[in-house]
């Protein structure tokens, strides 16, 4: 459980950069082995637990379409079609990042002792 506090610390930027760098490297290797993919293939990302939060953070700053000459160190070098989040604590991170965000409670909800 120490990965979450570590991610929320001053190391967040380094973690994001490492993930983006490795994902871009793997994408380039895959495209070298499968040359037809770069123009026609689609990329889907599956994130589990903290990985889904990291993917959401990267994609939230990602431009809609990628221009290779405008790549930033925090941008994937590819367009992403879908993000699938499994076992994601994204709700916690959204509450942590936006504490002013109003919660919506369903009618009739109450604490059960």
Image (cartoon, rainbow, N blue to C red):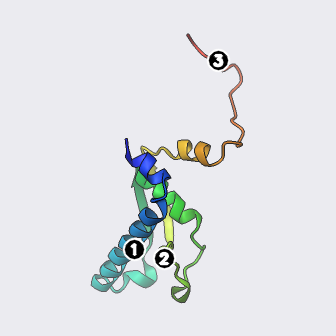
Say if residue 83 shows up in the picture.
Answer: no
Foreground tag (3 vs 1): 1
SS category of the residue bearing label 3: loop
Residue receiving disc 1: 21
Residue at 72% x, 39% y: name it. Answer: 102
- Residue 108, relative to residue 39: is it above or below? above
Picture disc at residue 73 = 2
Q: Name the quarter where the N terminus is drawn.
A: top left
Residue 38 place in picture, x, y as percent: 41, 83
Label 2 with label 1: CB-CB less than 8 Å: yes
Residue 72 place in picture, x, y as percent: 52, 79
Other residues around mark 2 within 10 Å, as few (<14) / some (14–19) / many (≥20): few
Residue at 71% x, 23% y: name it. Answer: 107
Residue receiving disc 3: 110
Residue at 57% x, 13% y: name it. Answer: 112
Q: Nearer the viewer, residue 13 or 90?
A: 13
């Amino acid at each position: 459980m120490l990965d979450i506090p570590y991610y929320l610390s001053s190391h967040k930027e380094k973690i994001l950069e490492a993930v983006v760098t490795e994902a871009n490297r793997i994408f380039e290797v895959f495209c070298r082995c499968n040359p037809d993919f770069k123009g026609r293939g689609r990329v889907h990302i599956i994130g589990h637990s903290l990985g889904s939060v990291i993917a959401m953070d990267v994609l939230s700053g990602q431009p809609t379409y990628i221009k290779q000459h405008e790549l930033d160190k925090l941008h994937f070098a590819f367009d992403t079609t879908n993000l699938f989040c499994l076992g994601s604590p994204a709700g916690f991170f959204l509450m942590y990042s936006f504490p002013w965000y109003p919660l919506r409670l369903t009618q009739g909800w109450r604490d059960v002792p």
